[in-house]
Image (cartoon, grey):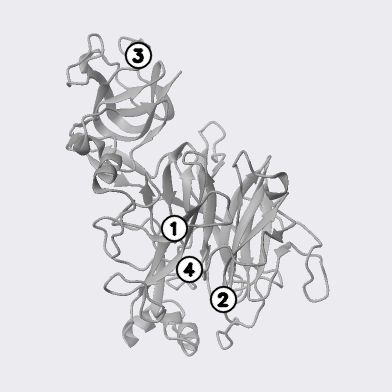
Amino acid sequence: MPRKFLATAALLLAFVSPTLASTEPIALGSRRALFVDEFLIARRENLELRLNAPQPRETVLTYDAPWEGSGSDFQRLIRVGDTLRMYYMATKLTSTDGKKIGGGVVYACFVESKDGVHWTRPDLGLFEFQGSKHNNIIWAAPNLDNFTPFLDTNPDCPADERFKATSGRAPGLFGLKSPDGIRWSLVSDAPIMTKGRFDTQNNAFWDAERKHYWCYIRGFHDASGQTTQDTKHGIRDIRVATSKDFRTWSDPQFLNYGSAPDEALYTNQVEPYYRAPEIFVAFPTRYVDRSFSPAAMRSLPDPAHRQRRMSFSPRYGTVVTDGQFMTSRDGYNFHRWDETFIRPGPERSNNWVYGDGYQSLGLIETPSEDPSAPPELSFYADEGHWKEGETLRRYTIRIDGFVSVHAKQKPGEFVTPAFIFSGRTLSLNFATAAAGSLRVEVQDAAGQALPGYALADCDELFGDTLNRPVTWHDKPDVGAFAGRPVRLRIVLSEADLYSLKFEP
């Protein structure tokens, strides 16, 4: 796998694991700390970091409009005021019986919703389809392959570029702009990027922490890790470029995954996590060519349709895909989990195909089914690729809940590296079993318990909440320790800890 680091080894080590590289305390401030890696864990005992699977919910959309079909995908979620928009590509891959491949024009469209469950197609009247403009098409161009917009939060962004987008077509990646996310125009007749492969969901956004744009794109490399133009035998990878103005971009660089195996990745779905924007979360699609035996082929859903589309290309039947999860603290070096985030699932009529697990780009808060329960995060994934009537399913996961510090019944504990915080109250996002618990000790930088804040002084925490203040003898105030190096020792039993934050 390519191992191109974008910083010196010392700087990388300091960023990824500050306790190993330096004795300098982490400047935590009032930022939310997610336990998606070991950044805030100096040592742990009898605990594990656990990847938590999202829950499948209802089908929210069927791609049955005449301009949609068996290849509609690449969803992008954006909240505009009190309305949710879901942008997507609309096209056909095969006929219903699988005997005809492609042939349809590719369009960019969007649907809108108030709750993330019920979606409608606005009648925009912008582009003609079969003699009518009564449709939700927002962009069409010759050889259009993909279209991925974002809401530009750059404070210097001109009003007519409040929305931007990337779109791939020969001879490269093009930039677009819009004042409202509905009416679009090119930023230039020339592509903004030409180095790379752009036949996937290319994903750009403004980073308020680092003050520049990122764009994650597709590349191919060979077994030795070198860039290749051989798309048949090359391995799909993800690369990233940066820009100050969205027009001029750096040369795309390989992402680094540490010791994770070299696997083909399709879409990338990288974005800053909105509650901790210094952390990037990503939901790439893993592309696996299984080279099935005839027996394996007959065992999977609808082998006849699979065999017919294989007549156009063998990989249309032999490739299967699923959804992955990874995170980064610098945009280049990612911790990719060695287990799957979304599996294809129990065999049904239309799954275990090339197209399963394509996760939407963007996370949105949606109400829980029980109005007294806290909100949760929603995102979406395609089902039924290659067939007319393809559908989109909603998934939910706990807010901050991608990964947790997990303890079984036998108590475990971890100690943080030294850090400096601002605020007066320590708040935890956690869940316990009925007999589970958490306790927190505040220590000085040397690891000695501070008077009145030892483990024995901490009031036991149990329950399931996104935001619970920690108290010691019923007192939550830790403001006296703000601005000086401290550590936390946290003991858990039958519990999951997702995040912590020091509040004002």
| Neighbours of disc 2 within 10 Å: few (<14), some (14-19), many (20+) | many
Q: Secondary structure at mark 3?
A: loop
The residue mark sitting in front, 2 or 4, is 4
Relative horizontal placement of residue 438, taking residue 198 as reference (left or right): left
Relative horizontal placement of residue 241, taking residue 166 as reference (left or right): left
Instruction: Please say whether residue 344 is visible from this viewpoint.
Output: no
Please name the residue shown 52% across and 68% down the image. Answer: 194
Q: In the drawing, what numbered circle is on residue 478?
A: 3
Quickly name the residue at label 2.
387
Q: Find out whether the residues at labels 1 and 3 contact each other: C-beta distance under 8 Å.
A: no
- Residue 3 in the image: state x and y as whole percent: 28, 60
Q: On screen, 498 above or below 79?
A: above
Which callout, 2 or 3, points at the residue further toward the start of the chain? 2
Which callout, 3 or 4, points at the residue further toward the start of the chain? 4
| Neighbours of disc 4 within 10 Å: few (<14), some (14-19), many (20+) | some
What type is the residue that disc 3 sits on?
Val
| Neighbours of disc 1 within 10 Å: few (<14), some (14-19), many (20+) | many
Alpha carbon distance from label 3 to label 4: 51 Å
| Neighbours of disc 3 within 10 Å: few (<14), some (14-19), many (20+) | some
